Image (spheres, rainbow, N blue to C red):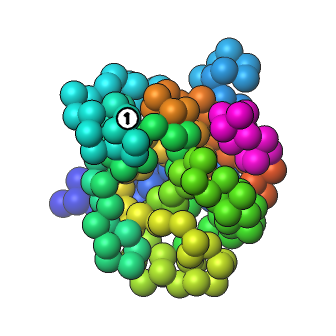
Amino acid sequence: MRARILLPAALTAALLTLSACGAGSGSASAGDTGAAPSNASSPAPSPTRSHDSGSGSQGAQVPEALNFTATTVDGRSFDAKTLAGKPTLLWFWAPWCPTCKGQAAETAKVAAAYRGRANVVGVAGLDGNAAMRDFVTDTGTGSFPHLSDEKGEVWKRFRITQQSSYVLLDRTGDTVFEGVLPGGKGLAEKIAALTG
C-alpha cells in the first residue's frame, strides 16, 4: 500500500524538477566552452547519415537526427527528413512557460529573416494540444511549424530536460548549439554563422 503512494509522489517530483521553467539562466554549446550543455545528460543524437538520400530538401542526405515524423499542433503530418540540407533550429517550449513566451517574438523574427536559408521548428510539450495551439496564436509564431509532442517523443530524441531550450543543427545534422537563450538573444547570430 505504501509503495502505491510513494511511487506517484516520486514521479511527480521528478517531473517537476525536469520541467522547471527557465531553470537556468542559459547554457553554452559544447563548442563554445568545451563542456557539455548543462541541460543535457548526454549528447544529442548521432549525426550518422541515413541511406535515404532523396527525401530531404534538395536531395540532401538525411542525418539520423532528422529521421523522425510527428504531428503539428494544427494536426498535419510532419516529416523531419524534409529539413535535411539546411541549418535547422528546434525550439522546445511549453505553453505555460513565461520564458518561452519571452523567446517567441525573437524566434519568429529569426524564422522570417532566414526563411528559405534555415529551418525553424517549434516542438511543444508538457501540455495538451489545445494549449499549444493557443500559445502559437497568442504569441504570433504561426509562420513556422510547431510539433505537438504531447508524449515527449521528440524531446526524448534530443534529450531535452527543460523547456525553453534551443537545439541548432548544421546542414549535415550535427548539433552546434544546445541550450537556453533568454529572450532569444544571440539566436540570429548563431543562425547567421551557419547560413553564410
**Foreground of the two, 44 or 3:** 44
| Residue 107 visible at all | no
Residue 71 horizontal/vertical position (percent): 31, 66
Label 1: how many Cα within 10 Å (few below 14, some 14–19, many 20+): some
Residue 139 horizontal/vertical position (percent): 66, 78
> Is residue 131 part of the magenta span, yes or no?
no
Residue 28 horizontal/vertical position (percent): 71, 32
**Foreground of the two, 102 or 189:** 189
- SS under mark 1: loop
The quadrant of the rendering that contains the N terminus is bottom left
Residue 168 horizontal/vertical position (percent): 58, 39
- Mark 1: amino acid: Ala
Above or below for 53 versus 21: above
Q: Which residues are magenta?
A: 186-196
Indicate left or right for 186 with 45 as reference: right
The quadrant of the rendering that contains the C terminus is top right
